[in-house]
Image (cartoon, rainbow, N blue to C red):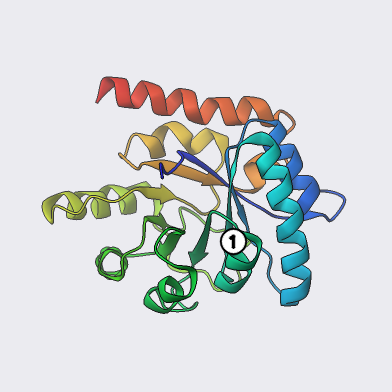
Amino acid sequence: MTIDQLHYISQPAADGSHLTAIKQALEAGCKWIQLRIKNQSPEEIRECAAEALKLCKLRGAKLIINDHPEIALSIGADGVHLGLEDMPVALARQFVGKNMLIGGTANTFQHIQQRVTEGVDYIGLGPFRFTTTKEKLSPILGLQGYIDILKQMDEAQISIPVIAIGGILPGDLQAIINTGVHGIALSGAITFSNNKQQTVKQVYAIKRIYVKNS
């Protein structure tokens, strides 16, 4: 399955609903949604996930569930994304089977090596800058962090889609994509954008130009 170049990480919209935010992101053109709900019961997350999957299917989008392989499997989601302190990838793979996508978080080149060994399908590398959406924040990477880690990956002949994540704003897109990452994950930059469709188009347009010039 192709890993999209724009991942929308859900957060509550102005009305407090993840589903509202997801619906708006889909209407703006997002094709890859990660449902990321913290501090709620599995039952509440499963209910929201089932509704989110319906929205994604209507738009031909993929739904990834953050941190809950059992929920991803039970509703028939497209994948699960695991943080470094979440369920081990090997155990999650046994749980969800060989066909479901598994993404993994990384903050260092050593984490990249670990994730590749574990068999993830893509890596969310970050954070780019400080973000309030994550409680336990790893060291900030900044542009140079991506440049350094991608260089180390190239030297080690490691090839896996890397998605930049963490506090990324529309003004950062060009510079981050120029580092050579596969794609970008956005949350607040879409949720609270006055022109969500323009933000989505901007990511895909910049990525196309980068690939053409590479």
Vertical order, 182 against 18 (above or below): above
Q: At which x and y percent is residue 34? A: 59, 54
Quadrant where the N terminus lies?
top left
- 128 or 111: nearer the viewer: 111
Q: Is residue 116 left or right of residue 182?
A: left
Q: Is residue 12 visible?
A: no
Q: Which quadrant does the C terminus fall into?
A: top left
53 w.r.t. 97: above or below: above
Left or right of 130 on screen, residue 132 = right
Q: Quadrant of residue 177?
A: top left
Up-down relation of residue 50 to residue 173 (above or below): below
Residue nearest the viewer, comparing 184 with 119: 119
Secondary structure type for disc 1:
strand
Residue for point 75% across, 46% down: 21
Return the x and y of residue 185 as percentages of the image width and height: 52, 47
Amino acid identity at mark 1: Ile
Residue 99: x and y, percent? Answer: 42, 58
Categorize mark 1 by other alpha carbons within 10 Å: few (<14), some (14-19), many (20+). Answer: many
Q: Position of residue 101 (x, y in %)?
A: 45, 57
Q: Residue furthest right?
A: 15
User: Could one spot residue 63 in this view of the protein?
Assistant: yes
At 19% across and 54% down in the image, what residue appears? 158
Which residue is under mark 1? 65
| Residue at point 39%, 23% (across, down) | 208
Residue at image position (46%, 69%) is 138
Q: How many marks?
A: 1
